Image (spheres, rainbow, N blue to C red):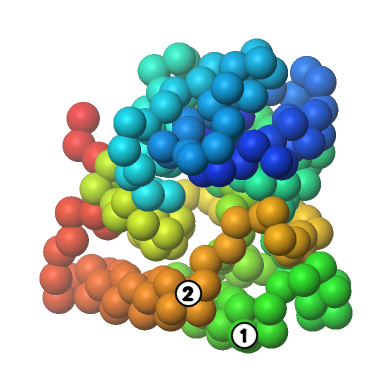
Amino acid sequence: MKVIAVLPAYNAEQTLEKTVRDIPPGSVDEIILVDDASRDGTAALARRLGLTTIVHEKNRGYGGNQKTCYAEALRRGADIVIMIHPDYQYDARLAPIMRALIADDICDLVFGNRIRTRQEALAGGMPLYKYICNRALTIFENTLTGQNLGEWHSGLRAYSRRVLETIPWELNSDDFVFDQQLLIQAACCGLRMGDIPVAARYFPEASSINFRRSLVYGLSTLVLLGQYVLHRLGLARFARLCPKTK
């Protein structure tokens, strides 16, 4: 199986090299970095590190960045795609474990779970309001979709090729709610999801959305869950929640 790590990057020059160095040798066959019109030297550093580097001329947003990541990974023949944030917020050493869970046909999607315990998450720097909202939304999402994930809001993710060829992620938002849309799509399509524990890392150089954008993100997630319920009950049909047609 060909495994490609994708790094959606924005102003990640200070943390990129540490992130790349943590990816265990042999766990991925290629690393693709998509620079979303950074204002620092992210792209230049990525090239020096030998990464396949794509640069957006204009900022397309977090979701828009991922769209380029996945399209390029599929084009290059990836069987497994692992998304790792290059801001060092997630532990890239877990890449081979995530790879194995998909390669061994145990999961179709695998996520990092930063909420092993409340004490650990808060000690890692997760703001209290984010912890509370994370737990509340995760419980609500698990209840509505029948899943049992420890966290629905992690940025450390791995997908099989089947996932990216089944769900219409191209129709998703270019903003941060892209991640939630993709998970709801996976649940709607009956794909197998699992998670593994990962430490929470919040520090000044790590990217994090502010309270206002977090509020928009949370409200957008609730709207999406409402659409999911209507779709599953057959009261409405949303193209985003239907599998791709070949």
Q: Is residue 25 above or below residue 5?
A: above
Of helix, strand and loop, which one carries label 1?
helix
At 56% from the left and 82% from the top, the residue drawn is 133
Q: Which mark is residue 213?
A: none
* Amino acid type, callout 2: Ser
What is the x, y in percent for residue 77? 47, 15
CB of mark 1 within 8 Å of CB of mark 2? Answer: yes
Between the residue at mark 1 and the residue at mark 2, the CA separation in whole angstroms equals 10 Å
What is the x, y in percent for residue 228? 30, 70
Q: Quadrant of residue 170?
A: top left
- Judge left or right: residue 206 versus residue 121: left
Q: Is residue 146 above or below residue 10?
A: below
At 71% from the left and 41% from the top, the residue drawn is 15
Task: Between residue 149 and residue 19, name the one nearer to us.
Answer: 19
The residue where tag 1 is placed is 129
Q: Quadrant of residue 197?
A: bottom right
What is the x, y in percent for residue 226? 29, 78
Residue 96 visible: no
* Amino acid type, callout 1: Tyr
Task: Between residue 43 and residue 154, name the one nearer to us.
Answer: 43
Q: Which mark is residue 214?
A: 2
